[in-house]
Image (cartoon, rainbow, N blue to C red):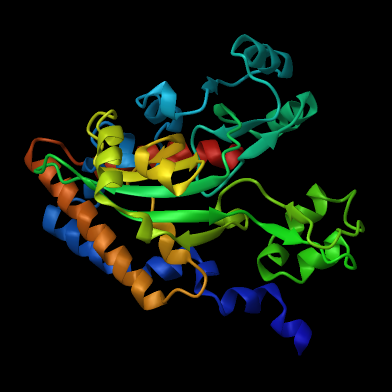
């Protein structure tokens, strides 16, 4: 019985943060459909961020969006177009002043798909053998804190506001001086769910005994699907912080709704805008603070309802100002292109 309750199925069943995306979003489908009827457009959300393809729901270039913000608040980032050889990528790294380790990630993609820390030229070779679409090389940012900051601005209003801050706690284990790395991974629910990947990543260290109190960060990519814990940090929202992100957001043409994934040294630096923005996501992003362990599913759904109400209002206001909604035919073409690219990767 103990084995059954320690299975991945029961670990996921007892914590709704692990439930499939479609189940959590099911109540929102009715709201989306109601708004679609009102606007006579299934893709009304495409008007939320007019300068971003589909408003940022799918198919947008992460590299192009990031180019709009100041170099002082983003890591060095370049785009690699395929096909490319290992030597060509190595040459690009040298020409642009990169040093290992660096981050590779698809220019299209989401939920941590194909995001890797590349430590050497062999890592480049392995990545090129898997990736089949253009990808981004980004300087590794080692600042200690990572947050997702969600920003909203109604087109009819001059200023916007931050309504969600998600803290990210990377997947790790702590040694007790007795158990090996494999045992520590398998006894921690969140790590056990990542066992398939971790047993390969740490195959040469699985029997190593971690000293008492020693902490090993298992995954350094801040994505929930990769084991990162999402924490509700909304208490950090202040008027000053909203003003700072209002200024940052206005660097991006016609940007009204989305999430900044970033790193910084402290909460004080976050409030002051002393950050390094890793990625900017449009209307396809969520206020991820709802996934804090132990949070109420009911409260999470309430937040998502408000989230879609904001998305609808922004899209409608932009449409009334002359922004066209994507047609179903255009949306289908974009979806087919994205699916064809990512399915080959």
**129 relative to 27 in the view: left or right:** right
On the question of residue 102 being in view, the answer is yes
The number of numbered badges drawn on the structure is: 0
Residue located 77% across and 27% down the image: 120
Residue 62: image location, x then y, percent = 44, 33
Tell which of 261 and 81 is nearer to you: 261
x then y, percent, for residue 216: 75, 53
- Residue 318 location (% of width, % of height): 14, 41
Position of the C terminus, as image quadrant, is: top right
Vertical order, 320 against 96 (above or below):
below
Q: Residue at x 26, y 59 (%)?
A: 308
Q: Is the residue 270 above or below the residue 226 in the image?
A: above
141 displayed left or right of 259: right
Q: Is residue 57 visible?
A: no
Judged left or right of residue 198, residue 263 is left
Q: Tell me the quarter of the image containing the N terminus.
A: bottom right
Q: Residue reaching furthest front? A: 268
In percent of the image, x 51 and y 41: which residue is there?
A: 265
Look at the picture and state if 36 lies above or below 176.
Answer: above
Nearer to us in this view, 62 or 97 = 97
In the image, taking residue 251 as reference, residue 147 lies left or right, namely: right
Q: Quadrant of residue 164?
A: bottom left
Q: Is residue 227 above or below residue 99?
A: below
Extreme bottom residue here?
Answer: 1
In the rendering, at what x and y percent does residue 92 appear? 63, 13
Depth check: give the residue in front, 270 or 319: 270
């Amino acid at each position: 019985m103990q084995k059954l309750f320690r299975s991945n199925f029961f670990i996921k069943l007892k914590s709704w943060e692990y439930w499939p995306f479609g189940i959590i979003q099911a109540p929102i489908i009715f709201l989306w459909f109601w708004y679609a009827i009102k606007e006579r457009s299934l893709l009304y959300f495409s008007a939320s961020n007019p300068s971003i393809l589909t408003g940022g729901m799918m198919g947008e270039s992460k590299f192009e969006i990031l180019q709009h913000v100041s170099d002082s608040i983003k890591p060095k980032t370049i785009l690699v177009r395929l096909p490319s050889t290992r030597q060509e990528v190595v040459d690009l790294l040298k020409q642009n002043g990169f040093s290992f380790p660096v981050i590779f990630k698809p220019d299209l993609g989401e939920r941590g798909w194909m995001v890797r820390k590349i430590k050497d030229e062999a890592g480049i070779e392995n990545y090129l053998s898997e990736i089949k679409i253009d990808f981004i090389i980004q300087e590794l940012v080692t600042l200690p804190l990572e947050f997702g900051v969600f920003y909203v601005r109604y087109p009819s209003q001059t200023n916007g506001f931050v309504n969600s801050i998600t803290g990210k706690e990377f997947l790790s284990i702590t040694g007790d001086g007795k158990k090996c790395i494999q045992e520590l991974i398998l006894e921690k629910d969140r790590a056990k769910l990542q066992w398939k990947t971790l047993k390969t990543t740490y195959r040469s260290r699985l029997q190593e005994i971690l000293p008492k109190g020693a902490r090993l960060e298992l995954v350094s990519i801040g994505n929930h699907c990769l084991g990162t814990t999402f924490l509700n940090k909304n208490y950090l929202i202040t008027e000053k912080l909203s003003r700072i992100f209002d200024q940052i957001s206005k660097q991006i043409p016609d940007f009204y709704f989305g999430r900044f994934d970033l790193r910084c040294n402290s909460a004080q630096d976050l409030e002051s805008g002393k950050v390094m923005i890793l990625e900017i996501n449009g209307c396809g992003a969520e206020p991820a603070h709802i996934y804090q362990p132990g949070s109420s599913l009911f409260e999470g759904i309430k937040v998502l309802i408000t989230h879609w109400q904001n998305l609808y209002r922004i899209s409608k206001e932009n449409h009334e100002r002359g922004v066209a909604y994507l047609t179903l035919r255009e949306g289908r073409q974009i979806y087919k292109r994205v699916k064809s690219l990512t399915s080959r990767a």
